[in-house]
Amino acid sequence: MSRRPSTTTGGGASDRRAVDESVHTPTGRAPRHPIRPSAGRIVDVNLIAFLISIVAFIAGIWIMGNAFYVEGFEVAVFIGGLTLTSLGFAVPIHVLKRIDG
């Protein structure tokens, strides 16, 4: 039969202090986010960039689909839609990694 540790150790304050020391830094403040200290600003930038990327991607697909209805400029409109779709991918992959870091 295995023994389970007792929940009442009698330590009281020392147990609470051990928990507090593991959560807070020596200055008494809660530690900042280790990767992004100003996480609120970066989340806002990421949200805006995400919305721009999604809009560019969807608009590019729509433009590529409608390129065949533009007489005389089919290739130019299709390449424009392809470029816009590519930009929809390029913003989160290449630009945001430089903003986050």
Image (cartoon, rainbow, N blue to C red):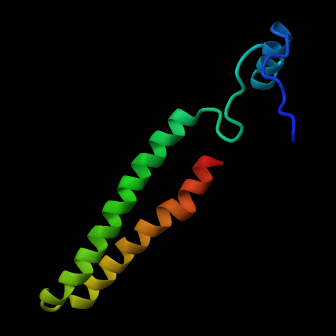
> In the rendering, at what x and y percent does residue 100 appear?
60, 48
Q: Nearer the viewer, residue 38 or 70?
A: 38
> Left or right of 21: which side holds 37?
left
> Left or right of 4: which side holds 60?
left
Q: Nearer the viewer, residue 75 or 89?
A: 89
Q: Is residue 17 above or below residue 7?
A: above
> In the rendering, at what x and y percent does residue 2 appear?
87, 40
Q: Nearer the viewer, residue 101 or 40?
A: 40
Q: Residue at the location (21% across, 89% down)?
A: 74
Q: Residue at the location (23% across, 75% down)?
A: 62
Figure quadrant of the N terminus: top right
Q: Residue at the location (42% across, 68% down)?
A: 87
Q: Is residue 59 above or below residue 36?
A: below
Q: Residue at the location (50% across, 41% down)?
A: 43
Residue 32 visible at all: yes
Give the residue at the far front of this rendering. Answer: 1
- Quarter holding residue 14: top right
- Quarter holding residue 4: top right
Q: How many marks?
A: 0
> In the rendering, at what x and y percent does residue 22 appear?
80, 25
Give the residue at the far top of this rendering. Answer: 13
Residue 27 visible at all: no
> Left or right of 53: which side holds 14?
right
> In the rendering, at what x and y percent does residue 48 appear?
40, 47
